[in-house]
Amino acid sequence: MDHFHDRDGVMHAEDVALDALAAAEGTPFYAYSSATIERHFTVFRDALAGLDDPLIAFAVKANPNVSVIATLARLGAGADVVSEGEMRRALAAGVPAGRIIFSGVGKTRAEMAAALIAGIFQFNVEGEGELHALSEVAAALGRTASVAIRVNPDVDARTHAKISTGKKENKFGVPLDRIAALYATAAGLPGIRPVGVAAHIGSQLASLEPLEEAYGKLGALVATLRRQGQTVERVDLGGGLGIPYDPSLPPPPGPAAYGAMVARVTAGWGVRLAFEPGRLIVGNAGVLVARVITVKSGGERTFVVLDAAMNDLLRPSLYGAWHDIRALSPRAGGMTATIVGPVCETGDQFAEDRSITPVQPGDLVAVMTAGAYGATMASTYNSRPLIPEILVRGRDYAVVRPRQTLDQLIGADRIAPWLKERP
Ligand SMILES: *Cc1c(COP(=O)(O)O)cnc(C)c1O
């Protein structure tokens, strides 16, 4: 469910007309709905209400805008971060350090030190080398790192290969049969307190079965570790729940079904559970609004060229991802068009041979479900400035990241000293 809807023939975000926003702020831009972000978080939280004090750590990489994180922090969300930059954003947004989980397969020593000094909740450690490095850094600082070992449960998440993370050939986590030895090593290392295990098997999961399979393996692992005398207080179940992109397809299982499965599978574990939802919280809470520059027809295909491109929203080019594309003020009739951006790449395409309501140059369109892995993956390829992010709340809106100017973009370059002299 989201708060983008038609009112008087034009798409609104909550009570803000998106065509008026386009006139005031220019295009393209991302618009986010506070009400949708809040709703998705509270629905997820309520679905887990039967659990004992779960930590819901929003996966910051899905949408790291500080205002987006702050919206969630006010509801009690924690943060799952994968870099020092994301940790700083979470702290700046008001997430307490005690609710921050540091994930990721390549934390540097400098990042470890920054997180130890901040006093974060937990490091999810992905391998033996990382564990030893963290021990050295923590010992040198006189701190103790709470560590969960990330398990690679070797389950097939049945999602796109590029967002599948829990098969044994993926780079993530530690194989199941090596966890017990690593946990014992951790227990003996200075500066390390092993607190539990973690898993995250992939993103945009369309079914609960792979999750249930992975969680079953985690439960067995907890029992094994305890039999070996280890203390296991926490289990981090990761993120990954899918969201509906294509309204013509059956929607993925929702938070209620997920919460019921988790309650059933984890009953009796006697641990504090953590969750790392990203896409589920913010995906449907954002749209990318763009203007039609031109419509090219006459050849094999009709191309609608937008002023937004793959550098603004990479998912269609990177994953072949499907996004609904709607005119803000739909005209009567229909057309079939391939919807592209102006970037000089054939892969710069939002949709192929798509049936849409007819559009003309100057019309506004919204690329739906662009709140997750949208702005966060943007680049300035083709020297296109980063576009603004706008957060709507009821009748109000705020530009929570202004449009980058060409001066900022170009002014970041430096002329090498030898090029300053005349040839
Ligand atoms: C990306 C990621 C998430 C969030 O995944 P979603 O599919 O957006 O829920 C959670 N945990 C880890 C470790 C991740 O890398």
Image: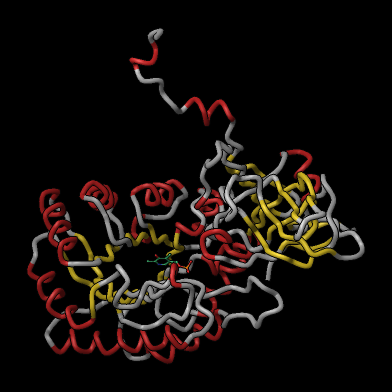
In the image, taking residue 182 as reference, residue 167 lies left or right, namely right
Q: Is residue 256 depicted above or below 120 in this figure?
A: below
| Residue in view at x 44 percent, y 62 percent | 59
Regarding residue 239, the answer to whether it shows in the image is: no
Residue at screen point 71% across, 49% down:
306
Q: Is residue 319 left or right of residue 328?
A: left
Q: Residue furthest top?
A: 422
> Is residue 341 visible in the rendered structure shown here?
yes
Image position of 193 with respect to 136: above or below: below
- Rendering coords of residue 405 (x, y %): 59, 31
Between 250 and 349, the one lying in front of the other is 349
Vertical comparison of 59 with 140: above or below:
below
Q: Which sits in the foreground, 71 or 385?
A: 385
Q: Residue furthest front?
A: 299
Give the residue displayed 28% in from the left and 52% down from the top.
115
Q: State the colouring used for the structure image.
A: secondary structure
x and y percent of residue 387 in the render?
Answer: 61, 42
